[in-house]
């Protein structure tokens, strides 16, 4: 039709109808199936306003109901379309694409979780192969330490509470997973012995005592646990003694250490309160019933030993448990003296 034949209403209808068709085509491309081999992307459609005499837009007849729907106020229009009045372009952004960053983050989180699970499985396999570290070589200890450091780099923030079973100790004496021995080493840290055992790594009193204890052939450490509850940690180490199998039954007991806890920036600050013997099989033997009543007041005893004439290290009953990695099923902890322990969550906790 010629330009003069168009009424102003008809020209407005033509422009709005064409613009609506372009917008619908763009939205259809954004929400519809992507072409094979091409990802979805933001679509831009140009709306060219053909102005007639006096600035009126060219229009053609169209459905009045459709025009009214397309000429809604901005407040009523869909929020996923924005118009740039300076260049005449309309941006159409699909809500599905707007959520893409969170989807990517979820995928990255799942990928990181899968990698951590694989690393945990490899670590636990090596821990089991070395009998919780009892028979580990120096190379194997270095491998465990390196694997733990890889996990520690991710450092997920997980609660420490629960019952944790010992899976690895960097020291051959598994009983040293008990915080009592962390405090005992701290108590004797400033003392050296003139008689150093051949298998002792240093001339410190605690190292010499551990070297002698680890060499004893007639005891075996069973399961060892840390039970962490609000304000308290209880360590349990099962010990079995088989001194004279032919004459006496094997003696079993659980060495239990109780500590109060205070959360710290690096894990937990422990104050060792007492250590006692529980569930001893010797209680049934005549004359050994007193064993169940044995309890060592660690905190008070260590405080007394810090005074004259012993003058041992003060404040030894307070130690740090550095929680360097904790997941839902595995925990890596270190001590300030450099000990490394790996624990797994007791299945009964799930």
Image: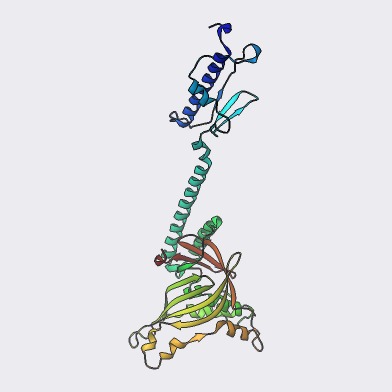
58 is higher (above) or lower (below) than 279: above
Q: Is residue 279 visible?
A: yes
Q: Position of residue 136 (x, y in %)?
A: 46, 67
- Residue in the foreground of this view, choosing between 288 and 159: 159
- Residue in the foreground of this view, choosing between 350 and 217: 350
Q: Tell me which residue sits at (47%, 73%) in the image.
A: 174
Residue lying farthest bottom? 287
Q: Is residue 200 visible?
A: no
144 is higher (above) or lower (below) than 311: above
Quadrant containing the C terminus in the rendered view: bottom left
Q: Which quadrant of the view contains residue 36?
A: top left
Q: Tell me which residue sits at (48%, 83%) in the image.
A: 276
Q: Position of residue 223 (x, y in %)?
A: 42, 73
Q: Tell me which residue sits at (36%, 88%) in the image.
A: 284
Q: Position of residue 1 (x, y in %)?
A: 53, 7
Q: Position of residue 319 (x, y in %)?
A: 59, 73
- Residue in the foreground of this view, choosing between 90 and 146: 90
- Lateral position of residue 257 relative to residue 187, left or right: left
Q: Which quadrant of the view contains residue 12?
A: top right
- Lateral position of residue 193 relative to residue 245, left or right: right
- Residue in the foreground of this view, choosing between 197 and 150: 150
322 is higher (above) or lower (below) than 89: below
């Amino acid at each position: 039709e010629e330009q003069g034949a168009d009424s102003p209403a008809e020209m407005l209808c033509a422009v709005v109808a064409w613009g609506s068709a372009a917008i619908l085509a763009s939205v259809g491309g954004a929400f519809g199936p992507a072409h094979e081999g091409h990802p979805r992307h933001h679509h831009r459609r140009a709306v060219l306003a053909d102005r007639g005499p006096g600035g009126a837009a060219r229009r053609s007849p169209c459905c009045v109901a459709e025009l009214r729907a397309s000429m809604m106020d901005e407040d009523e229009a869909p929020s996923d379309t924005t118009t740039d009045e300076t260049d005449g372009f309309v941006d159409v952004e699909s809500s599905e694409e707007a959520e893409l960053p969170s989807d990517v983050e979820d995928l990255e989180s799942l990928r990181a979780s899968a990698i951590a699970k694989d690393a945990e499985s490899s670590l636990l396999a090596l821990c089991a192969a070395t009998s919780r570290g009892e028979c580990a070589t120096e190379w194997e200890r270095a491998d465990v330490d390196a694997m733990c450091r890889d996990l520690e780099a991710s450092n997920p923030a997980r609660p420490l509470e629960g019952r944790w079973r010992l899976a690895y100790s960097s020291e051959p004496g598994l009983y040293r997973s008990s915080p009592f021995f962390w405090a005992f080493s701290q108590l004797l840290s400033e003392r050296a012995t003139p008689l150093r055992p051949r298998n002792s790594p240093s001339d410190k009193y605690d190292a010499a005592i551990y070297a002698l204890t680890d060499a004893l052939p007639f005891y075996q450490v069973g399961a060892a646990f840390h039970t962490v509850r609000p304000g308290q940690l209880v360590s349990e180490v099962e010990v079995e003694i088989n001194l004279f199998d032919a004459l006496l039954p094997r003696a079993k007991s659980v060495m239990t250490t109780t500590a109060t806890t205070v959360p710290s920036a690096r894990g937990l600050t422990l104050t060792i309160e007492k250590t006692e013997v529980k569930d001893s099989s010797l209680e049934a033997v005549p004359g050994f019933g007193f064993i169940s009543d044995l309890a060592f007041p660690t905190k008070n005893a260590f405080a007394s030993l810090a005074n004259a004439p012993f003058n041992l290290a003060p404040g030894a009953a307070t130690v740090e448990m550095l929680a360097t990695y904790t997941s839902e099923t595995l925990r890596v902890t270190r001590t300030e003296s450099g000990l490394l322990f790996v624990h797994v969550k007791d299945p009964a906790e799930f």
